[in-house]
Amino acid sequence: MTLAFVIGDRNRALGPGRFHYCRCMACQAIVLADVPSDLGSYYAANGYGSAVEPEVPAFVRREQAKLELVRRFVKGGSMVEIGPGPGMFTRVAQRAGFDITALEMDPEYCRQLRDLLGVQAIQSDDPAEVLPTLPPADAVVMWHVLEHLGDPWRVLDSCVQNLRPGGVLAISTPNPQSLQFRLLGRYWVHLDAPRHLQLIPAGALSSRLEQLGMRHLLTTSTDPVGRDCNRMGWEYTLRPHPASHGPTIASTGGGWLIARALRAVERRGRQGSTYTSLFACER
């Protein structure tokens, strides 16, 4: 490991800490070396929405696109969703006929998922501990969860063990090999210190999962969520202090223009700000 940079909570300014990120020279992952003992306090602003809020059509279309990636390889059955938050994807998958079990650390989100959506919601901040207790699943999905895990490799191992033969694992996560990260470094919005503990390159993720008996199906950085994250990354770059300055006409319009100008570059060779990878269990 070698020190990559030091940065504070630029996105939300929820604490005074300075955080040291290191680069693994073997796999090029970016790892937070000094995880704060009060990490939970850095999540205490606005959350990620609520299941009781009205559904926004644009968000529904985005979640539907994620589901369609999964349905290319598994049409239905049981699905474990790790870190569903307010359940935007959960609702779309449930309507498509999947039987959802949600693993979520927030007790209020768990209550909403049970009461409003009727899904089995298990409160836990340790998915690796819960997964072995569940029946085999046809799909396990983690949408922008991997980067929040203290030990992602342990969780991935449990995901593989939970899948039926032929089952599918779907993962979306920020891309440390993206054009934005190479240009912006510690000021990149999708670093999101200190909430993002590890940023894992797509190649390293594939290598590890193949060792666990998974077959790589696809990796894309041009899905709708990835394209939204590209635009968001440039828009945040135009805010000098994102935690205290919200979007303006200039930053929103400028971010859109930069994303449009660099669209061809970011869509080439997995240079987008996030990637989504799918794998099939061959055990």
Image: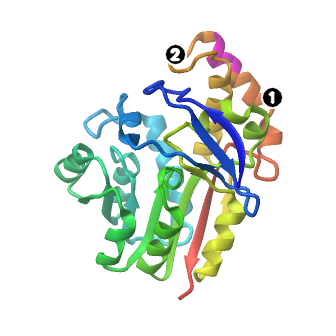
Number of callouts: 2
Q: Hey, what amino acid is under mark 1?
A: Ala
Query: In the rendered view, would you say 196 is above or below 277?
Result: above
Q: Does the magenta run of residues contain 253?
A: yes
* Numbered tag placed on residue 261 in the rendering: 1
Callout 2: SS: loop
Q: Which residue is mark 2?
A: 246
Q: Hey, what amino acid is under mark 2?
A: Gly
User: Which of these two is toward me, 202 or 267?
Assistant: 202
**Which residue of the protein is positioned furthest toward the top in this rendering?**
249
Magenta span of residues: 250-254
Task: Please state the horizontal and vertical placement of residue 218, each as a whole percent of the image.
Answer: 67, 65
Callout 1: SS: helix
Task: Please state the horizontal and vertical placement of residue 149, each as a whole percent of the image.
Answer: 47, 55
Residue 186 appears in the figure: yes
Residue under the point 43% across and 36% down: 57
Q: Main secondary structure of the magenta part?
A: helix
Q: Quadrant of residue 190?
A: top right
Query: In the rendered view, would you say 219 is above or below 178?
Result: below
Q: Residues within 10 Å of mark 2 (few under 14, many from 20)?
A: few
* Numbered tag placed on residue 211 in the rendering: none
Q: Does the magenta run of residues contain 247?
A: no
**Which residue of the protein is positioned furthest toward the left in this rendering?**
115
Q: Residues within 10 Å of mark 1 (few under 14, many from 20)?
A: few
User: Which of these two is toward me, 189 or 263?
Assistant: 189
